[in-house]
Image (tube, grey):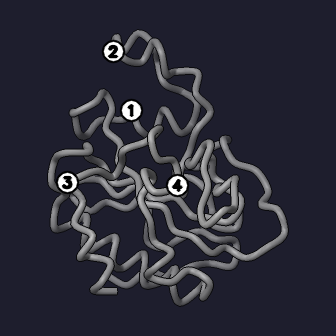
Amino acid sequence: MSLSLCPEGWLTPARHCPSPHCDQRPEGEISLLVVHSISLPPGRFGGPYIDQLFQGKLDPDADPYFADIHQLRVSAHCLIRRDGELVQYVPFTKRAWHAGLSCFEGRERCNDFSIGIELEGTDTDAFTPAQYRQLIQVSRLLLSTYPAITRERIVGHSDIAPGRKTDPGTGFDWGVIERL
């Protein structure tokens, strides 16, 4: 099924799960795509916890790991689940809070000019073929919509926050980007 993008920045078809953890972007073009990985609790897939984290509704009693993270105010534009399901939390026209302290080519505050896509997974596990198919489809649409994003400007969280972040990790096949 082919993806489309409405003027407000929402993908169709995707499951929309709006996050309050976003705000208006500053003036300027969107010029970077950041690939992340996430699993909650770490190493476990499925369940409602990623949605809950990005919506500020994570129950600290649902898992011992959540006690330290339930108050985080974080989000991403999209999540691609292990089965390829596409979930969108923040429209691309707004700034998601995914990169944190970050720098790309000498420019800090990568959230200002980037789009963040999370892949459900860990830094070491291989991602699924369904995730790569969906990532390729989303990336192609974003590259055609935002011409300042090029293949060279698709990076991992670890590239913009070295020493602080390691995702998407060794389990990510960067050869996928060459197929765009």
Between residues 73 and 154, which one lies in front from this camera angle?
A: 154
Under mark 3, the amino acid is Gly
Confirm or deny contact between disc 2 and disc 1 (CB under 8 A). Answer: yes
Where is residue 68 shown, x and y percent of the image?
48, 15
In the image, residue 36 above or below residue 132:
above
Q: Residue furthest right?
A: 27
The reply, left or right, for residue 67 in relation to residue 171 is right
Helix or strand or loop: what does disc 4 sit on? Answer: helix
| Residue at mark 4 | 160
| Residue at mark 1 | 49
Q: Which mark is residue 171?
A: 3
Q: Gap in Å between the C-alphas at discs 2 and 1?
A: 10 Å
Under mark 2, the amino acid is Asp
How many other residues sit within 10 Å of disc 2, few (<14), some (14-19) or many (≥20)? few
Q: Gap in Å between the C-alphas at discs 3 and 4?
A: 18 Å
Q: Nearer the viewer, mark 3 or mark 4?
A: 4
